[in-house]
Amino acid sequence: MSTTKARKLKQLVQSPDLTFLMEAHNGMSAKIAERTGFEAIWASGLSISTAFGLRDRNEASWTQVLEAVEFMSDATDVPILMDGDTGYGDFNNVARLVRKLCNRDVAGVCIEDKLFPKQNSFLGEGQALLTIPDFVAKIKAGKDAQTDPDFCFVARVEALIAGRSMQEALDRAGAYTDAGADAILIHSKKSDSVEIEEFCRQWDNRSPVVIVPTKYHDTPVDVFRDLGVSAAIWANHAMRAAITAIEETCAEIYRTQSISAVEKRVAPLKDVFELTGENVFEEFAQRYSA
Ligand code: SPV
Ligand code: MG
Protein backbone atom coordinates (compact mmCIF):
# COMPACT_ATOMS: atom_id res chain seq x y z
CA MET A 1 0.00 0.00 0.00
CA SER A 2 1.34 3.42 -0.86
CA THR A 3 2.02 5.82 1.97
CA THR A 4 -0.86 8.19 2.58
CA LYS A 5 -0.32 11.91 2.91
CA ALA A 6 -1.40 11.70 6.54
CA ARG A 7 1.17 8.98 7.21
CA LYS A 8 3.88 11.12 5.59
CA LEU A 9 3.00 14.10 7.76
CA LYS A 10 2.88 11.97 10.88
CA GLN A 11 6.31 10.52 10.08
CA LEU A 12 7.74 14.01 9.51
CA VAL A 13 6.26 15.33 12.73
CA GLN A 14 7.33 12.33 14.82
CA SER A 15 10.83 12.04 13.38
CA PRO A 16 13.64 13.54 15.48
CA ASP A 17 14.79 15.59 12.47
CA LEU A 18 13.67 19.19 12.01
CA THR A 19 11.21 19.51 9.10
CA PHE A 20 10.17 22.71 7.32
CA LEU A 21 6.62 23.43 6.18
CA MET A 22 6.28 26.07 3.48
CA GLU A 23 3.22 28.27 3.34
CA ALA A 24 0.92 28.10 0.35
CA HIS A 25 -2.49 29.60 -0.24
CA ASN A 26 -3.72 28.18 -3.55
CA GLY A 27 -2.98 25.39 -6.00
CA MET A 28 -0.24 27.34 -7.75
CA SER A 29 1.74 28.29 -4.66
CA ALA A 30 1.33 24.77 -3.26
CA LYS A 31 2.74 23.29 -6.44
CA ILE A 32 5.69 25.69 -6.43
CA ALA A 33 6.45 24.87 -2.78
CA GLU A 34 6.39 21.15 -3.58
CA ARG A 35 8.63 21.56 -6.63
CA THR A 36 11.12 23.54 -4.61
CA GLY A 37 11.59 20.48 -2.43
CA PHE A 38 9.46 21.13 0.65
CA GLU A 39 8.21 17.89 2.11
CA ALA A 40 5.06 19.41 3.58
CA ILE A 41 2.89 22.49 3.18
CA TRP A 42 1.24 24.89 5.63
CA ALA A 43 -2.18 26.03 4.38
CA SER A 44 -2.04 29.36 6.17
CA GLY A 45 -5.27 30.98 7.30
CA LEU A 46 -3.64 34.41 7.07
CA SER A 47 -2.41 33.82 3.53
CA ILE A 48 -5.61 32.21 2.23
CA SER A 49 -7.63 35.10 3.72
CA THR A 50 -5.25 37.66 2.24
CA ALA A 51 -5.41 36.01 -1.18
CA PHE A 52 -9.21 36.37 -0.95
CA GLY A 53 -8.71 40.05 -0.02
CA LEU A 54 -10.09 39.40 3.47
CA ARG A 55 -8.93 39.90 7.05
CA ASP A 56 -7.58 36.99 9.09
CA ARG A 57 -10.69 37.13 11.29
CA ASN A 58 -12.79 34.25 9.94
CA GLU A 59 -14.31 36.55 7.36
CA ALA A 60 -13.95 33.75 4.82
CA SER A 61 -16.39 30.94 5.61
CA TRP A 62 -14.90 27.60 6.55
CA THR A 63 -16.12 26.00 3.32
CA GLN A 64 -14.43 28.75 1.30
CA VAL A 65 -11.16 28.00 3.09
CA LEU A 66 -11.73 24.27 2.66
CA GLU A 67 -12.21 24.74 -1.07
CA ALA A 68 -8.90 26.61 -1.35
CA VAL A 69 -7.19 23.80 0.58
CA GLU A 70 -8.80 21.21 -1.68
CA PHE A 71 -7.27 22.88 -4.74
CA MET A 72 -3.91 22.77 -2.96
CA SER A 73 -4.30 19.11 -2.05
CA ASP A 74 -5.35 18.17 -5.59
CA ALA A 75 -2.32 20.01 -7.02
CA THR A 76 0.29 18.26 -4.87
CA ASP A 77 1.49 14.93 -3.50
CA VAL A 78 3.12 16.26 -0.35
CA PRO A 79 1.06 16.41 2.85
CA ILE A 80 -0.76 19.57 3.84
CA LEU A 81 -1.26 20.80 7.39
CA MET A 82 -4.33 23.03 7.30
CA ASP A 83 -4.53 26.04 9.57
CA GLY A 84 -8.03 25.42 10.93
CA ASP A 85 -8.00 28.53 13.17
CA THR A 86 -10.25 27.79 16.19
CA GLY A 87 -12.16 25.09 14.32
CA TYR A 88 -14.97 27.45 13.21
CA GLY A 89 -17.13 26.77 16.26
CA ASP A 90 -17.19 24.21 19.05
CA PHE A 91 -16.17 20.53 19.34
CA ASN A 92 -18.96 19.58 16.92
CA ASN A 93 -17.65 21.91 14.21
CA VAL A 94 -14.12 20.58 14.73
CA ALA A 95 -15.33 16.99 14.31
CA ARG A 96 -17.07 17.91 11.05
CA LEU A 97 -14.00 19.77 9.79
CA VAL A 98 -11.75 16.77 10.50
CA ARG A 99 -14.09 14.42 8.62
CA LYS A 100 -14.13 16.77 5.63
CA LEU A 101 -10.34 17.07 5.64
CA CYS A 102 -9.92 13.27 5.73
CA ASN A 103 -12.31 13.04 2.75
CA ARG A 104 -10.14 15.49 0.86
CA ASP A 105 -6.80 13.82 1.64
CA VAL A 106 -5.60 16.72 3.76
CA ALA A 107 -3.03 15.26 6.16
CA GLY A 108 -3.65 17.26 9.29
CA VAL A 109 -5.17 20.28 10.95
CA CYS A 110 -3.90 22.82 13.43
CA ILE A 111 -6.49 24.20 15.83
CA GLU A 112 -5.70 27.09 18.20
CA ASP A 113 -7.08 27.72 21.69
CA LYS A 114 -8.54 31.16 21.00
CA LEU A 115 -12.17 32.20 20.44
CA PHE A 116 -14.21 32.41 17.23
CA PRO A 117 -13.95 34.72 15.35
CA LYS A 118 -10.19 34.58 15.78
CA GLN A 119 -7.81 37.37 14.99
CA ASN A 120 -4.25 37.06 13.82
CA SER A 121 -1.74 36.40 16.61
CA PHE A 122 0.31 39.46 15.73
CA LEU A 123 -2.58 41.87 16.29
CA GLY A 124 -3.53 43.42 19.63
CA GLU A 125 -2.65 42.40 23.16
CA GLY A 126 -4.21 40.00 25.65
CA GLN A 127 -6.32 37.98 23.22
CA ALA A 128 -8.95 35.83 24.96
CA LEU A 129 -8.31 32.10 25.25
CA LEU A 130 -10.76 29.21 25.36
CA THR A 131 -10.89 27.30 28.66
CA ILE A 132 -8.75 24.18 28.83
CA PRO A 133 -11.78 21.81 29.17
CA ASP A 134 -13.49 23.35 26.14
CA PHE A 135 -10.34 23.05 24.04
CA VAL A 136 -9.75 19.49 25.25
CA ALA A 137 -13.28 18.69 24.00
CA LYS A 138 -12.30 19.97 20.54
CA ILE A 139 -9.19 17.76 20.48
CA LYS A 140 -11.09 14.66 21.60
CA ALA A 141 -13.93 15.24 19.14
CA GLY A 142 -11.45 15.86 16.33
CA LYS A 143 -9.41 12.74 17.05
CA ASP A 144 -12.55 10.61 17.35
CA ALA A 145 -13.81 11.94 14.01
CA GLN A 146 -10.73 11.18 11.89
CA THR A 147 -11.28 8.48 9.30
CA ASP A 148 -7.56 8.23 8.48
CA PRO A 149 -5.70 6.71 11.45
CA ASP A 150 -2.64 8.85 10.72
CA PHE A 151 -4.46 12.18 10.50
CA CYS A 152 -2.47 14.73 12.53
CA PHE A 153 -4.19 16.97 15.02
CA VAL A 154 -1.84 19.78 16.00
CA ALA A 155 -2.98 21.68 19.11
CA ARG A 156 -1.84 25.30 19.03
CA VAL A 157 -1.07 26.94 22.35
CA GLU A 158 -1.65 30.71 22.26
CA ALA A 159 -0.87 31.36 25.92
CA LEU A 160 2.38 33.25 25.23
CA ILE A 161 0.68 35.27 22.46
CA ALA A 162 -2.07 36.20 24.94
CA GLY A 163 0.48 37.36 27.55
CA ARG A 164 -0.16 34.45 29.92
CA SER A 165 2.62 32.74 31.90
CA MET A 166 5.06 30.09 30.74
CA GLN A 167 3.47 27.77 33.32
CA GLU A 168 0.06 28.23 31.70
CA ALA A 169 1.56 27.47 28.27
CA LEU A 170 3.07 24.26 29.69
CA ASP A 171 -0.14 23.32 31.51
CA ARG A 172 -2.19 23.80 28.36
CA ALA A 173 0.31 21.82 26.25
CA GLY A 174 0.15 19.02 28.84
CA ALA A 175 -3.66 18.91 28.87
CA TYR A 176 -3.82 18.96 25.07
CA THR A 177 -1.28 16.14 24.76
CA ASP A 178 -3.16 14.07 27.34
CA ALA A 179 -6.34 14.65 25.31
CA GLY A 180 -4.73 13.04 22.25
CA ALA A 181 -3.13 15.87 20.25
CA ASP A 182 -0.40 14.52 17.96
CA ALA A 183 1.78 17.61 18.34
CA ILE A 184 1.87 20.99 20.07
CA LEU A 185 2.34 24.24 18.17
CA ILE A 186 3.75 26.83 20.54
CA HIS A 187 3.47 30.32 19.12
CA SER A 188 5.34 33.50 20.05
CA LYS A 189 5.32 37.06 18.77
CA LYS A 190 8.64 38.00 20.37
CA SER A 191 11.44 39.10 18.06
CA ASP A 192 13.85 36.69 19.76
CA SER A 193 13.37 33.02 20.53
CA VAL A 194 14.04 33.18 24.29
CA GLU A 195 10.53 32.17 25.37
CA ILE A 196 10.30 29.45 22.71
CA GLU A 197 13.63 28.02 23.89
CA GLU A 198 12.42 28.14 27.49
CA PHE A 199 9.18 26.37 26.57
CA CYS A 200 11.04 23.65 24.66
CA ARG A 201 13.48 23.04 27.50
CA GLN A 202 10.69 22.69 30.06
CA TRP A 203 8.42 20.71 27.74
CA ASP A 204 11.30 18.30 27.15
CA ASN A 205 9.72 16.73 24.07
CA ARG A 206 6.74 15.21 25.86
CA SER A 207 5.22 15.34 22.38
CA PRO A 208 6.43 16.80 19.07
CA VAL A 209 6.76 20.59 18.98
CA VAL A 210 5.94 22.79 15.98
CA ILE A 211 6.99 26.46 15.81
CA VAL A 212 6.30 29.48 13.61
CA PRO A 213 9.43 31.68 13.62
CA THR A 214 7.85 34.59 11.69
CA LYS A 215 8.93 37.19 14.27
CA TYR A 216 12.11 35.54 15.56
CA HIS A 217 13.44 34.91 12.08
CA ASP A 218 17.06 35.68 12.97
CA THR A 219 17.43 32.62 15.19
CA PRO A 220 19.57 30.04 13.31
CA VAL A 221 17.59 26.85 12.68
CA ASP A 222 20.30 24.82 14.42
CA VAL A 223 19.05 26.30 17.69
CA PHE A 224 15.66 24.69 16.99
CA ARG A 225 17.35 21.45 15.95
CA ASP A 226 19.29 21.31 19.20
CA LEU A 227 16.06 21.88 21.14
CA GLY A 228 14.46 18.90 19.39
CA VAL A 229 11.82 20.97 17.56
CA SER A 230 9.97 18.74 15.06
CA ALA A 231 8.79 21.27 12.51
CA ALA A 232 9.22 24.93 11.69
CA ILE A 233 6.58 26.66 9.60
CA TRP A 234 7.58 29.39 7.15
CA ALA A 235 4.10 30.74 7.54
CA ASN A 236 3.38 33.54 5.09
CA HIS A 237 6.31 34.12 2.78
CA ALA A 238 4.79 32.91 -0.50
CA MET A 239 1.86 35.29 0.02
CA ARG A 240 4.14 38.21 0.98
CA ALA A 241 6.47 37.50 -1.95
CA ALA A 242 3.46 37.51 -4.29
CA ILE A 243 2.30 40.88 -2.94
CA THR A 244 5.71 42.43 -3.53
CA ALA A 245 6.04 40.96 -7.03
CA ILE A 246 2.51 41.97 -8.05
CA GLU A 247 2.94 45.49 -6.64
CA GLU A 248 6.24 46.00 -8.49
CA THR A 249 4.93 44.60 -11.76
CA CYS A 250 1.69 46.62 -11.66
CA ALA A 251 3.64 49.80 -10.89
CA GLU A 252 6.07 49.28 -13.76
CA ILE A 253 3.30 48.54 -16.27
CA TYR A 254 1.25 51.50 -15.04
CA ARG A 255 4.23 53.86 -15.21
CA THR A 256 5.53 52.80 -18.64
CA GLN A 257 2.14 52.04 -20.23
CA SER A 258 3.90 48.99 -21.61
CA ILE A 259 4.45 45.36 -20.70
CA SER A 260 7.78 45.27 -22.50
CA ALA A 261 10.04 46.09 -19.55
CA VAL A 262 8.56 43.42 -17.27
CA GLU A 263 8.45 40.65 -19.87
CA LYS A 264 11.81 39.21 -18.84
CA ARG A 265 11.04 39.45 -15.13
CA VAL A 266 7.76 37.53 -15.07
CA ALA A 267 7.31 33.77 -15.48
CA PRO A 268 7.25 32.81 -19.17
CA LEU A 269 3.93 31.46 -20.40
CA LYS A 270 5.56 28.11 -21.09
CA ASP A 271 6.18 27.82 -17.33
CA VAL A 272 2.55 28.74 -16.65
CA PHE A 273 1.35 25.99 -18.98
CA GLU A 274 3.81 23.50 -17.54
CA LEU A 275 2.75 24.33 -13.97
CA THR A 276 -0.85 23.47 -14.76
CA GLY A 277 -0.02 20.28 -16.67
CA GLU A 278 -0.60 21.41 -20.24
CA ASN A 279 2.58 19.54 -21.19
CA VAL A 280 0.97 16.18 -20.38
CA PHE A 281 -2.50 17.01 -21.71
CA GLU A 282 -1.72 15.89 -25.29
CA GLU A 283 -0.86 12.38 -24.13
CA PHE A 284 -3.96 12.35 -21.96
CA ALA A 285 -6.14 13.46 -24.89
CA GLN A 286 -4.58 10.84 -27.20
CA ARG A 287 -5.53 8.08 -24.77
CA TYR A 288 -9.19 9.00 -24.90
CA SER A 289 -9.54 10.20 -28.49
CA ALA A 290 -12.08 8.22 -30.49
C1 SPV B 1 -1.18 31.63 9.69
O1 SPV B 1 -0.26 31.51 8.88
O2 SPV B 1 -2.34 31.90 9.38
C2 SPV B 1 -0.91 31.44 11.12
C3 SPV B 1 0.40 31.78 11.65
O3 SPV B 1 -1.82 31.06 11.84
S1 SPV B 1 0.28 33.38 12.30
O4 SPV B 1 -0.05 34.29 11.20
O5 SPV B 1 1.56 33.66 12.86
O6 SPV B 1 -0.76 33.42 13.32
MG1 MG C 1 -3.62 31.37 11.05
Image (cartoon, grey):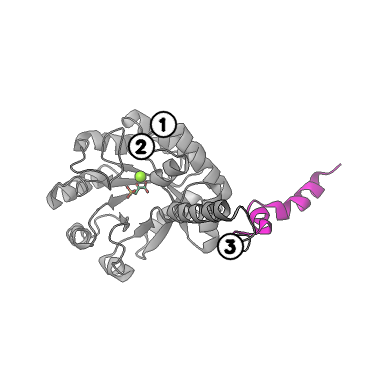
Residue at the disc numbered 1: 96
Image quadrant of residue 222? bottom left
| Relative image position of residue 187 (x, y in whole percent) | 26, 52
**What residue is rendered at 35% in x and 40% in y?**
85
Image quadrant of residue 224? bottom left
| C-alpha distance separating marks 3 and 2 | 45 Å
Query: SS of the residue at dot 3?
Result: loop
Q: Which mark is residue 142?
A: 2
The amino acid on which the numbered mark 2 sits, given as a three-letter code, is: Gly
The amino acid on which the numbered mark 3 sits, given as a three-letter code, is: Arg
Dot 3: few (<14), some (14–19), or many (≥20) neighbours within 10 Å? few
* Residue sitting nearer the eye, 50 or 253: 253
Q: Which mark is residue 265?
A: 3
Query: SS of the residue at dot 1?
Result: helix
**What residue is rendered at 61% in x and 61% in y?**
261
N-term-proximal mark, 3 vs 2? 2
Query: SS of the residue at dot 2?
Result: helix
Query: For the C terminus, which image quadrant?
Result: top right
N-term-proximal mark, 1 vs 3? 1
